Image: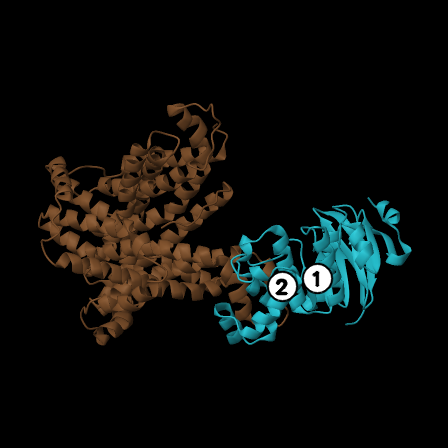
Amino acid sequence: MPDLDLSGLTASYGGKRVLGPLALKVSTGEHVALVGKSGAGKSTLVRLIHEQVGRESSLIPQELGLVNVLSVFHNVFMGQLDKHPTWYNTLTLIRPFATDKRVVRDLLHELGMTEKLWAPTASLSGGQRQRVAIARAMYRNADLLLADEPVSALDGPLAHIIMRLLTKRFATSVIALHDVDLALAYCTRIVGIQDGQIALNEATERLAVSDIMSLY
Amino acid sequence: MLTSPTVRASLIFLAIALVGLCFADIAITTSNPWGDLGNFFLGVITPNFFSSEGLMTALLRTVAFGFVGVALGSVSGFILALGYRFLPVRMFCAFIRAIHELFWALIFLQFFGFHPLTGVLAIAIPYAGIFAKVYSEILDEADPIPARLLPPGTGTISAFIYAHIPDSWVQIRTYTAYRLECGLRSSAILGFVGLPTLGFYLETSFSQGLYSDAGAMLILFYVLIATMPLWVRPKLLPIYVVGAPFFLGEGLPIVWGNVARFFTQDIIPKPIRNGDGLASLATWFNDMLINEALPGIWNSIVLTQIALVATGILALLAFPLISNHFGGPLRRTSGHILLVIVRSTPEYILAYILLQLWGPSMLPAVVALALHNGGIIGHLIGRQSNSIRLRQDASTGFNRYAWELVPRVYRSFLAFLFYRWEIIMRETAILGILGIYTLGFYVDSAIQNIQFDRAMMLILITALLNIGVDTLGRHIRQKLALQTMPTC
């Protein structure tokens, strides 16, 4: 994947500019955390980046985008619908193939929810639903991860496990996070957003919690 | 209160109906209307289920035509729904659903004759138009995010069956099942133009004064509709759909010469057929317009507006019957039964019965339309009122009705009423076949005089009138910001 060099990112709401114009560079191998107060424009920025890089990235939106009546397996499988011909996808909807079942089950095992493989996603808790969206993004297997608060509904230890998994699995990532400790622990660079502008852009090793707190 | 747009709209419609009432032909012309009505009710409570084996055959045919018609309509409707964003497809669907099942049956009868295909297509064609519209609305409402998250290069069909269908599936299934009930009603009334369904049996029994036979048929029909949740099961549906075509009966063979003649000669306006030139075509058209179309349109509109307001009043009076906020379980149960009966009786059958008893005028039509549609809307808003939670010290009795409930349900009540405006219009035109001077009367007379060119032109005008009312109704609902689910 080539490095990302995004510029002229702007967003308006009701005629009023809420974000930008700002520019952001992300090199391959970097894990960038977007931090800032709620309403600062983190989600908007993730959406804008996704619009610019197109669908060649794995996206975990805040609203997850699950098909509620389909099972966990099928929601995860949707990450690779482009890899198979239509007849294969149609048959999978009715009766999944053993190989796919194994791969998806292993993936869910890493996320700690194997037992829910055939449950409809509508019946899951918030944290479980979030992990289904994460599994779908991982199954998708793109080089770049774009995620908006991917672990917001997960408890402490699990949030750490999943963040480690995501940053290991994807070569490059841009992740909006409200949890500063997670950002410092797993990302290589922190980008702070304040009033729609980049107020902080620094490698993690040169930052402490107190530096980030000035954003809040 | 007069400044509220919903109240103002209601008052305008009330005023129009009152003016219409001055021009309407409202009368009871039979010599002994109440005695006949009494005899009829006596027939209903002393049903005769064993008069002839024709009854069970008619019931079987009704179900078979309903299933085949709705199945064909839903498959075609689904395919049309996929192209619904294209204007020509939308216009085509609007046109085929603007023509009532009975008109379609009358058309097909002229060239297919009493062949099963006539009944099947008469249901399938207008239903396809309705299914296309509702399916496309349901599909549009599906959550768009899953589709946006699909990897690039995902095939169109794969994207559709994963990201669109599952999310809409429950609604599609519910709506199709609901339409099946409507399809059984449509199938029953096809008997009135001679197809071998319940309407035919009812008309025969009635004309011979066999009220107990007619009563038995009506009771069986209610039982059939009321028990649908028991016998229409997802697992049994494929069996029904595959089996139904074998129970449509033989009918008469299609004479293909008739089909060809119908399209190449019969429906071509006479002056063109005879090569008489444009001037005589204009005369032909003017004659039809002044003597048939305009009186038909006028009577259809007058009847529709009166029936619409009567429907509204009846619905507002009827909904407390099933509302949890009044009375005890006994009254609610009887209320439910009453509303089930009036809404599952097709308005055409109600109008037919009342017309036999009271003689031809607009009165039986208004009462039939108001009973049927008022029953449907009353049921829907009654159910909706049950989800309203009143404060514990809310007033009771009439004050509760007038201050707590009616204001809260009024908007959705109006939404349903304006939605049904076009349906009432379509029915009004059709009731002309029974002898009320609406558009259907002139269509039927033209067909009986073997003037198919006139009949087709009048059906076309009816369709345009329905499309106009549909557009107007949608415009008013948008203007008043009213939303509703489709009903039939």
Q: How is the image coloured?
A: by chain
Number of the label disc, if any, that sits on residue A108: 2
Between residues B30 and B126, which one lies in front from this camera angle?
A: B126
Q: CA distance from mark 2 to mark 1?
A: 28 Å
- Rendered position, B288 above or below A102: above
Height in image: B29 above or below B170? Answer: above
Q: Quadrant of residue B127?
A: bottom left
Q: Which residue is mark 1?
A: A51
Number of the front mark, 2 or 1:
2
Picture residue at 70% right of the left edge, 62% below the top: A51
Relative side of A42 to B119, left or right:
right
Which residue appears at 83% of the width and 56% of the height?
Answer: A190
User: Which amino acid type is shown beneath numbered disc 1?
Assistant: Glu
Residue B274 appearing in the image: no
SS at circle 1: helix
Q: Position of residue B331 (x, y in %)?
A: 30, 32
Q: Quadrant of residue A176?
A: bottom right
Which circle's residue, 2 or 1, is located before the other in the chain? 1
Same chain under badges 2 and 1? The reply is: yes
Residue in the foreground of this view, choosing between B72 and A86: A86
Looking at the image, the residue that sits furthest to the right is: A206
Residue B21's place in the image compared with A182, above or below, is above
Q: Position of residue B240 (x, y in %)?
A: 30, 64
Chain identifier, colour brown = B
Q: Nearer the viewer, residue B81 or B340?
A: B340
Element marked by disc 2:
helix
The cyan chain is A
Label number found at residue B258: none
Closer to the camera in the image, B12 or A113: A113
